[in-house]
Image (cartoon, grey):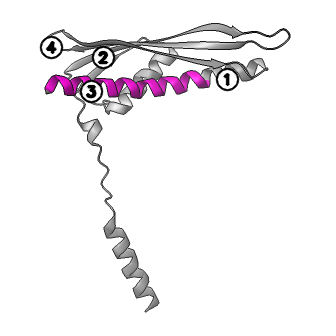
Amino acid sequence: MKYLSYLLFFIILSSCGNFQKTSESISKIPQIIIKTSNDKYDALLKYELKKLTKLFYQTKYKYELKANITFSYDTVMKIKGKNALKEMTIKLNYTLTNFSTNVKVIEDKIIRRTNYGSISSLYGSNKSENHMKERYVKKLSKTVINKIKFALTKIEN
């Protein structure tokens, strides 16, 4: 009797969930070919954009996305005898073009600024800086995809 009640509980519990993995937001993105330069962070940007649009094996493309990310640095505050607080500016330029008509659909840039520099060791500060760049590339790729979805929805309606 105990096993029967566990079995019934398991059947009822498993019938309540939907186990199909669906994503409406990804399915609404048309086929996009993504072009970036070959440096480390542009390659990571391309990978993240492909991951978000699920474009690893598509052959026919409707749009072309050209993206480029750059980093610039500036010293914000320096106190005598202490490490300087630095500011990193991350700039992502991207252009979405209709592949068949060669008409620009979106041409935009995203600029983000962040402060860093609280780690005193050289190895730790380099690792912190690289980790921060990777996080921003992932975050900005999501922002780009959302802006593209918005622009293409606006065009279709």
Q: CA distance from mark 1 to mark 2?
A: 30 Å
**Residue at position x 41%, y 25% in the image:** 141
Check residue 100 in the rendering and tell me which mark sits there, or answer none.
4
Q: Between disc 1 and disc 2, whose residue precedes?
A: 2
The amino acid at mark 3 is Phe
Eyeballing the image, is 113 above or below 141? above
The amino acid at mark 2 is Leu
Eyeballing the image, is 145 above or below 91? below
Task: Report whether residue 60 is seen.
Answer: no
Decide: marks 3, 1 in contact (CB < 8 A)? Answer: no
Q: CA distance from mark 4 to mark 3?
A: 21 Å
Query: Is disc 2 placed on a helix, strand or loop?
Result: strand
Residue 73 percent across, percent down from the top left: 61, 8
**Residue at position x 37%, y 71% in the image:** 13
Q: Disc 3 marks which residue?
A: 150
Left or right of 106? Residue 10 is right
Q: CA distance from mark 3 to mark 2?
A: 15 Å
Left or right of 58? Residue 77 is right
Q: CA distance from mark 1 to mark 4?
A: 43 Å
Quarter of the figure with residue 123: top right
Q: Quadrant of the N terminus?
A: bottom left
The amino acid at mark 4 is Ser
Check residue 127 in the rendering and tell me which mark sits there, or answer none.
1
Disc 2 residue crowd, few under 14, some 14–19, many 20+, Cα 10 Å: many
Query: Is disc 4 placed on a helix, strand or loop?
Result: loop
Residue 89 percent across, percent down from the top left: 55, 12
**Residue at position x 18%, y 9% in the image:** 103
Q: Which residues are magenta?
A: 131-156
> Which residue in the rendered view is the most extreme toward the right?
81
Disc 3 residue crowd, few under 14, some 14–19, many 20+, Cα 10 Å: few
